[in-house]
Amino acid sequence: MPELYEGIANFYDESSGLWEDMWGEHMHHGYYDTDSGSSSQNDHRLAQIMMIENSLAFAQVADSKEERPTHVVDVGCGIGGSARYLARRYEAKVSAITLSPVQAARGNVITASQGLTDLVTLQVANALKQPFEDGSFDLVWSMESGEHMPDKQQFVGELARVAAPGGRIIIVTWCHRDLELGETCLKPKEQALLDKICDAYYLPAWCSPSDYMELLKTLELKDIKYADWSKNVTPFWPAVMASALSFRGLIKLATSGWTTIRGALAMRLMVQGYQMGLVKFAIITAQKPL
Ligand code: SAH
């Protein structure tokens, strides 16, 4: 898999600065309250925070001083937006890993500028071979990194391994739709679309939310559950596309590299995937028994 890992590292090395300029430190979808029609649908930074908060609530992460997480791992951390948020939220120590040296370096600079160096550390490491002891963390956080993992079994195995007894595991990730009864694979047209998205974003083969559930069930975990938040992220990609097409976005894109431009061009494929009901935005959580 070295080629995939190199591709991922290069993609984020090259594109993270542009993303940070346009969108800030969180490199993930926003969660929108699509029923209320409220103004928060236009507040994308708030929606990104709502994604974090709703994920914590869904996993029933404790808030009280006695029970809240004290040691957190952010697996696939980008420039550490979640890592710093969680450190502040829980006064927790956060270890964060990414494949991108540029992200790790930039993330540590932001962390220092926010006075969080004692709590948060970003480093380059592979999620499938984490440099942590068994049972180290009472919150294991993976926000939109699972889709990059070439071996989902090993991925969830590592998440479970580093979780402490009683610890929560949160995976928020892109999936393809569950297969229907009698189906053995996606339709050729669907697979063709996913293949194009994979090329642009350096993703290996996708799986469904049910596949994740099955994998987690093979591990010693309890309270394994999942929700489909695809509807709640609908406003996100159109907003990212609009920002890319803004004057500032276009100038920045024009001065960035090909992989970033290719990523920007693929945004419409994601919108198409959601519209077809093919791409699913899933949260999957579990707890390691005490
Ligand atoms: N969770 C972050 C970033 C999401 S972007 C946020 O919400 O802001 C995806 C991240 O996953 C990138 O930082 C990328 O380097 C990381 N990633 C992908 N595959 C990885 C792997 N095998 N090991 C560690 N990090 C990985």
Image (cartoon, grey):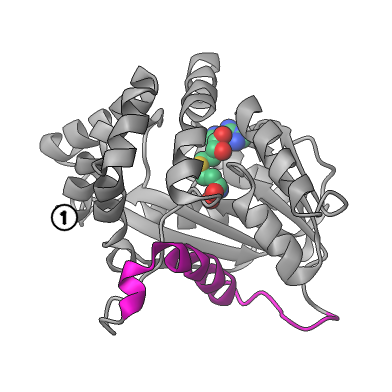
Which image quarter: residue 167? bottom right
x and y percentages locating residue 56 in the rendered image: 59, 71
Figure quadrant of residue 189: top left
Q: Position of residue 266 (x, y in %)?
A: 25, 35
| Residue 233 as seen in the image, left or right of residue 124 | left
Amino acid at pointer 1 = Gln
174 sits left or right of 14 in the view? left
139 up-or-down from 179: above or below = below
**Which percent across, then down, holds residue 250?**
28, 34
- The prevailing secondary structure element of the residues shown in magenta is helix
Q: Is residue 145 visible?
A: no
- Residues rendered magenta in the picture: 39-66
Instruction: Look at mark 1 in the image and give the residue it sits on.
Output: 275
In the image, is 236 to the left or to the right of 55?
left
Q: Residue furthest top?
A: 3
Q: Residues within 10 Å of mark 1 (few under 14, many from 20)?
A: some
50 within the magenta span? yes
Task: Give the quarter of the image for residue 44.
Answer: bottom left
Q: Answer whether residue 179 is visible to the viewer in this image.
A: yes
